[in-house]
Image (cartoon, grey):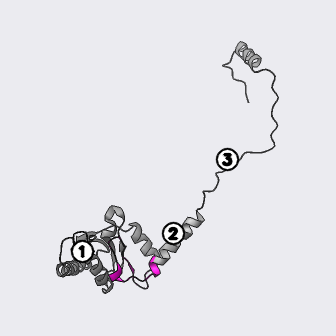
């Protein structure tokens, strides 16, 4: 350490008297500036993976779906990573269809027309808002349950899942469509 020329001899002497006799500490340990690795939440990740696997492998009966249940479908042969991206909202939403307030027949026709339109325009990821059924007679999701069945019958549908809360939660789905060939 070099002595600074800005400190006068008088100030330096005053400092030495105030501090008194000192003995340097001998330290044999060297402190490392290396950052410690981030904590790895092994159990949380394992739990999340188990839930995701259950969602992917699980069978869903449309008749048993309730208002708060998530919709989830992955066509065989489609990578699980694709579903993860869809669930996270990674794919940009290119269009949307709102089926609120429609009868079952009107909703089915609107869905069919919408999907034909999307295919003709090369749209791959869309959002379909089906609602939660709160306005139906029994407060049960009629369109939601029908939509789940209809979409699984279509060859142009690769995958779908309930949307993130910001995009409608269990009242809407993200839908991934096959490229038009």
Which residue is painted at 81% across and 43% down in the image? 28
Which residue is painted at 68% across and 20% down in the image? 5
The residue carrying mark 1 is: 138
Q: CA distance from mark 1 to mark 2?
A: 34 Å
Q: CA distance from mark 3 to mark 1?
A: 64 Å
Apparent side of residue 24 relative to residue 34 in the rendered image (left or right): right
Dot 1: element: loop
Q: Is residue 45 magenta?
A: no
x then y, percent, for residue 60 = 39, 82
Residue range corresponding to the magenta coloring = 55-78
Which residue is painted at 64% across and 51% down in the image? 35
Dot 3: element: loop
x then y, percent, for residue 32 = 70, 47
- Mark carried by residue 5: none
Q: CA distance from mark 3 to mark 2?
A: 34 Å
The residue carrying mark 3 is: 33
Q: Mark 3 and 1 residues: CB-CB less than 8 Å, in contact?
A: no
């Amino acid at each position: 350490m070099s002595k600074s020329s800005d400190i006068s001899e008088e100030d330096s002497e005053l400092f030495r008297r105030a501090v008194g006799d000192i003995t340097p500490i001998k330290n044999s340990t060297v402190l490392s500036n290396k950052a410690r690795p981030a904590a790895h939440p092994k159990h949380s990740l394992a739990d999340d993976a188990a839930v995701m696997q259950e969602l992917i492998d699980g069978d869903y009966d449309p008749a048993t779906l309730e208002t708060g249940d998530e919709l989830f479908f992955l066509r065989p042969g489609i990578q699980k990573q694709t579903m993860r991206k869809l669930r996270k909202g990674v794919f940009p939403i290119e269009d949307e269809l709102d089926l609120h307030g429609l009868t079952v027949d009107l909703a089915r026709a609107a869905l069919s027309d919408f999907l034909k339109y999307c295919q003709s325009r090369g749209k791959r990821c869309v959002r379909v808002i089906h609602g939660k059924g709160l306005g139906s007679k029994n407060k049960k999701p009629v369109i939601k349950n029908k939509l789940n069945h209809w979409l699984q019958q279509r060859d142009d549908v690769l995958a779908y899942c309930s949307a993130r809360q910001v995009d409608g939660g269990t009242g809407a789905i993200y839908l991934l469509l096959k490229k038009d060939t």
